[in-house]
Amino acid sequence: MTFPRRTFLKILPAGLLAACGNSSKIRLALNWKPDPEFGGFYAADYAKHGLDVEILPGGSGTPTVQMIGAGSAEFGIIQADELLLARARGNDVVALFAAFGNSPLGIMAHASRHLESIGDVLKNGTLAIESGLPYARLLKRKFGFDHVKIVPSPGGDLTAFLNDENFAQQCFVTAEPLQAKRKGVDVKVFPISDIGYNPYTTVMAAGGDLVRMNPGMAKNMVAAVGEGWRAYLDNAAPANERMHAINPSMEAADYAEIAEAQKPLIESSPLGKMTTERWDTLAAQLKELGDIPQAPPADQCFRDL
Amino acid sequence: MRKALPAAIPFLIVTLAMEWLVREGWIKAFLVPPPSAVFRTMIGDAPELFAALAKTSIGALTGFALSAFGGIAIAVFLSSSRAIQRAFYPYAVFFQTVPIIAIAPLLVIWFGYGMRTVVASAFIVSIFPVIANTLDGILSTDPALRDLFRLYGASPSATLWKLRFPAALPQILTGLRIAGGLAVIGAIVGEFIGGQGLGSVVDVARTQQRTDKVFAAVLLASLLGLALFGFINILSRIALRRWHASEQN
């Protein structure tokens, strides 16, 4: 078949425009695939607040905090410690809404090892974690890594964990342990907050410029997301169905179960709200670890709109 | 020195331009670090970076050596008959298409964390160009020379080692040049999952949003690739200078 050159030239600009997307849309970048961790963002009725929002699903290592700084997304999902690192590197990002008041980050080990605490996990065997995260260095400082083999986190993959009884790995306490149980392995889960490290997680953030120059849009976004999370906590089914359609690699039943399991971590504080004390504590911890040169004032890090 | 000059000029121009763009605020430093910051990191973190480079070098070179010998051996085997080629060549293509990231968790199960996974990864991604180029070279011997060997009653093995293999050397070396760069990439991907060397440095620095350190590690990785490329060029010069146009003048 021959493809007339003229047709091609006519199609080309249209294709390019389509690839760029509609620039008037507000982009919300996720740092992982759609799953219950983002339920409220999918449940939100943005149109009601006059917003046309496009949610951009992410994956392992999606640099949402840099995307916000680069302007390739207006809003992004980040973790509180990431934001402090970003600000220290000159990336002006501001937290607006914290979905998880308590961090769902944890370490899971085989129940058959009868471990009592995180310290026990580090006494032998293998531990898969993201060594770049501040909590990893906090663990190292507290317990030392002399007796445990530290390997890279497989990012949600359970192959090595299921294969080796002495393998422990970083997890979201609401997600991977459930999947391990489905595969017939009994697990013991240790939340990282046990060692006093508890950054706000699944935090919606935006660039400082956007918050200053377009506070109305930021405020509407926070309102829409707040209502979305309320709706998701009351009835997760509609948003779960939508997320499952985009990310079918997770079973429909898992969506429902995780949505239920994560409720205590979300409802532990007034929905979405953050406090100066919590930000100060975290900043002090990161400074102590040498990740940031100085602790920034908390009011630069988050805004209550 | 005079030979290195043409290559140094684009490097200098790009480096200075990047420095200027970041200093003037056209590019944000947390997205692309100024070259001066990369060099400072390279000096400040030298012990960590060079220890990592040494590990990556061992992984990449071992993987590359296995690819070179394995790939040439497989290609010689495949060249022995049309039937063998039809039976096995499609499986060689498997190596070219295997998505290394997808089988990464399995590599770790099969080979364990550390060096062996890194070598396996470097090997898997770099063997195909050696097989394909070697085979192509062996099969495209000048028919006139082949007839000459037949006329003198040369045995198949004499034809292979005295004619077809030497005649294929330019293609084999091209295959090795491609494989060298791929072996470095494969080693670093292996290190993302196997946990050591420059791959691990990049992984950690990325989490810490240290773009300067990411670039420093990437720069060292490309130096490794360049060194490997240079080594193959020397081999090529030694092997081909007497008879092949590409290495004359």
Image (cartoon, coloured by chain):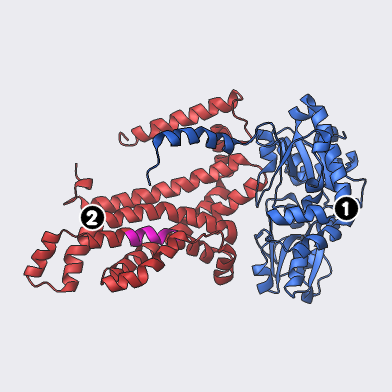
Overall secondary structure of the magenta section: helix
Q: Secondary structure at mark 1?
A: helix
In the picture, the disc for residue A233 is 1
Tell me if I can see residue A234 in this picture.
yes
> Which quadrant of the figure has residue B11?
top left
Residue B129 part of the magenta segment: yes
Residue at the image position 83 percent from the left and 66 percent from the top? A117
Question: In terms of depth relative to the viewer, which is nearer, B18 or A226?
Answer: A226
Do dots 1 and 2 share one subunit?
Answer: no
Query: What segment is highlighted magenta in the picture?
Result: B125-132
Q: Where residue B114 sits: x, y (%)?
A: 56, 64
Give the colour chain B carries in the figure. Answer: red
Chain on which label 1 sits: A
Q: Colour of chain A?
A: blue
Q: Amino acid at mark 1?
A: Leu
Direction from residue B139 to residue B196 in the image, left or right: right
Q: Which mark is residue B239?
A: 2
